[in-house]
């Protein structure tokens, strides 16, 4: 009788351990998937194939990471920070002549519906870049937006005139950076 009781206890404990391990596995997989948010770029093909987007992530310690997100229609997987605060700067160039910088923080990181969508669209003969951080804002097309402007106008508007600084910005707007 005691042997039978020990077998039942052993079987019960084995079942508990198996259920716990399965829950741990499911939680790990779900959290890993949730944390692997990547930036996605949307727009008409003729706009995308003429656009370059370099992204700089500045983490909460001030460390910078530079990557290319889009280069003449080819999109690269760039993970978005979902655990800690980060600031992003998108250096956008269309046909190497229209440029602008879109800056935003990952304030949507704690939302259940966070996404990292970047839209390029043409409106009133202008190219706009829009960042949308939550799924519910996609329908409203509500997000951070900048309109691209001629490169020389951008430099003038931002008081950029010395050759060294212009070269730095040209690299960020026009060159392919490392991609992870």
Image: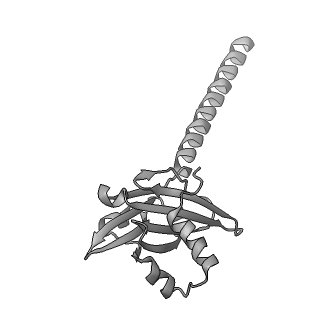
Q: How is the image coloured?
A: one colour
Could you tell me which residue is drawn at 63 percent across and 63 percent down? 84
Could you tell me which residue is drawn at 50 percent across and 57 percent down? 69
Q: Is residue 106 visible?
A: no
Between 11 and 162, the one lying in front of the other is 162
Quadrant of the rendered image containing residue 159: bottom right
Quadrant of the rendered image containing residue 148: bottom left
Q: Is residue 104 visible?
A: yes
Outermost front residue: 163
Could you tell me which residue is drawn at 40 percent across and 69 percent down? 130
Query: Does residue 94 appear to the left or right of 13 in the view shown?
Result: left
Label total for image: 0
Residue 32: image x %, image y %? 57, 45
Quadrant of the rendered image containing residue 95: bottom left
Between 165 and 85, the one lying in front of the other is 165
Locate the N terminus by quadrant: top right
Could you tell me which residue is drawn at 30 percent across and 65 percent down? 139
Identify whether 6 is placed above or below 46: above
Residue 33: image x %, image y %? 53, 45
Query: Does residue 56 appear to the left or right of 13 in the view shown?
Result: left
Residue 57: image x %, image y %? 60, 64
Residue 171: image x %, image y %? 57, 66
Outermost left residue: 124
Between 58 and 27, the one lying in front of the other is 58
């Amino acid at each position: 009788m005691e042997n039978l009781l020990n077998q039942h206890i052993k079987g019960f404990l084995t079942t508990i351990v198996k259920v716990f391990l399965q829950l741990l596995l499911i939680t790990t997989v779900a959290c890993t998937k949730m944390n692997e948010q990547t930036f996605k770029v949307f727009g008409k093909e003729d706009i995308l194939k003429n656009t370059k987007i370099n992204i700089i992530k500045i983490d909460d310690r001030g460390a910078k990471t530079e990557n290319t997100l889009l280069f003449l229609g080819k999109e690269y997987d760039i993970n978005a920070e979902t655990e800690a605060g980060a600031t992003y700067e998108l250096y956008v160039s269309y046909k190497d002549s229209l440029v602008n910088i879109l800056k935003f923080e990952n304030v949507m990181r704690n939302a259940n519906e966070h996404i990292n969508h970047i839209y390029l669209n043409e409106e009133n003969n202008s190219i706009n870049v829009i960042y949308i951080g939550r799924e519910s804002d996609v329908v409203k097309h509500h997000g951070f937006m900048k309109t691209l402007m001629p490169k020389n106008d951008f430099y003038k508007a931002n008081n950029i005139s010395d050759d060294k600084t212009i070269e730095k910005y040209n690299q960020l707007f026009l060159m392919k950076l490392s991609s992870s």
